[in-house]
Image (tube, rainbow, N blue to C red):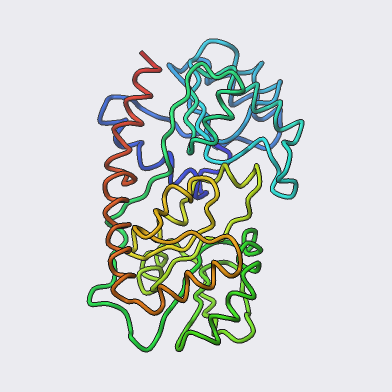
Amino acid sequence: MTRDRGGAPFRQRIEPYLPLLAERRIEAEVVELAAGARARWGQFRPACQFDGVLLHRKTLTAWDALALGDAPPLIYDFDDAVMYQARSPEAPHPGRERRFYRTVARSELAIAGSPNLETHASLAGAARVEVIPTGLETGAFQPKEGGRSPEQVRLVWIGSASTLRQLTTLGPVFEAVGRHVPGAVLRVIADARLQVPGLEVENVPWSLEAEARLLAEADIGIAPLPDTPYTRGKCGFKVLQYMAAGLPVVASPVGVNAEYVQPDVTGLHATTAEEWTAAVERLAADPALRERMGQAGRRRVEKEFDFSVLGPKVCRLIEETLA
């Protein structure tokens, strides 16, 4: 049961594992939850007859919990700090926090997308919490062979209109890079446009079909992120995409980004404008370093974050909960 069957979180955390569950004789019926409480009642009541319910991201209102009852085992999967609002990242929203606590307390298993979210679930009284990072199909990303253009260094950021403000904080960095790095270009893959004085910007509309190619054509992935209680729960999918595409990554060391991006191995950390400028300029000046870090990142994603690695773990957790 999910809020948005067509959204990226469902596509990344649930949909890839449905065929694996079917192979293990666990049949799944996907229900996209309605916005209205009365309509959701009509969706949760029949769920009582199933052997188990997997609830993705959506938290339970008191009415939802009453409709679901106590009968079926509940698995709650979440990959975001759902107890916060993005516009108020410093403190949990009281209503959201109550719903989160209610959902976790009702669950036999909470599957968290990061250690930070695992902590939230444990504090909420979860009976069992397991961390499963958001995965991807590494094979869909084909790192560019033979190196990139020596005349151009392309930075890349992938995101959306709602997260573009994270990128705008690097305005002074981009201006400095434009002055000091010959041929520097910033590629923005999103449903919004960005202009930076002094630096060429390629604004490319996002599409699922093109994202892997658009990333692999770049040289350096960037992942700025403010450090707040809300953002510390982010699951670092952007960073994993860069690494799968064979790119070195410069990232704010916030949440899992601090662990995914290993300094001088898969990329560099940066907090201040000076650190960001130095990190980008260092990578821009050293193609061999970019290649080494990119290969190391790709290997790590293949080993730890590919669907083929995470799928059996997800299936085992579901089987154990339904047993």
Residue for point 50% across, 26% down = 110
The foreground one among 94 and 174 is: 174
Residue 26: image quadrant is top left
Q: Quadrant of residue 276?
A: bottom right
User: Quick one: 187 or 71, which is closer to the camera?
Assistant: 187
> In the current view of this chain or complex, which residue is farthest to the left?
146
In the image, residue 46 sits, relative to residue 226, either above or below, namely above
Q: Is residue 164 visible?
A: yes
* Residue 90 horizontal/vertical position (percent): 72, 43
Q: Residue at x 71, y 21 (%)?
A: 62
Residue at point 46% right, 18% down?
A: 50
Residue 7 image point, x, y percent: 52, 49
**Where 116 falls versus 265 (above or below)?**
above
In the rendered image, residue 277, in percent from the top left (x then y), is placed at: 54, 73
**Left or right: 317 with respect to 44?**
left
Counting from the top left corner in percent of width and height, residue 102 is at: 65, 21
Query: Is 131 above or below relative to 105?
Result: below
**Residue at 75% of width from left, 36% of height from top?**
93
**Could you tell me if residue 243 is visible in this image?**
no
Query: How many circles with numbers are drawn on the protein?
Result: 0
Quadrant housing the C terminus: top left
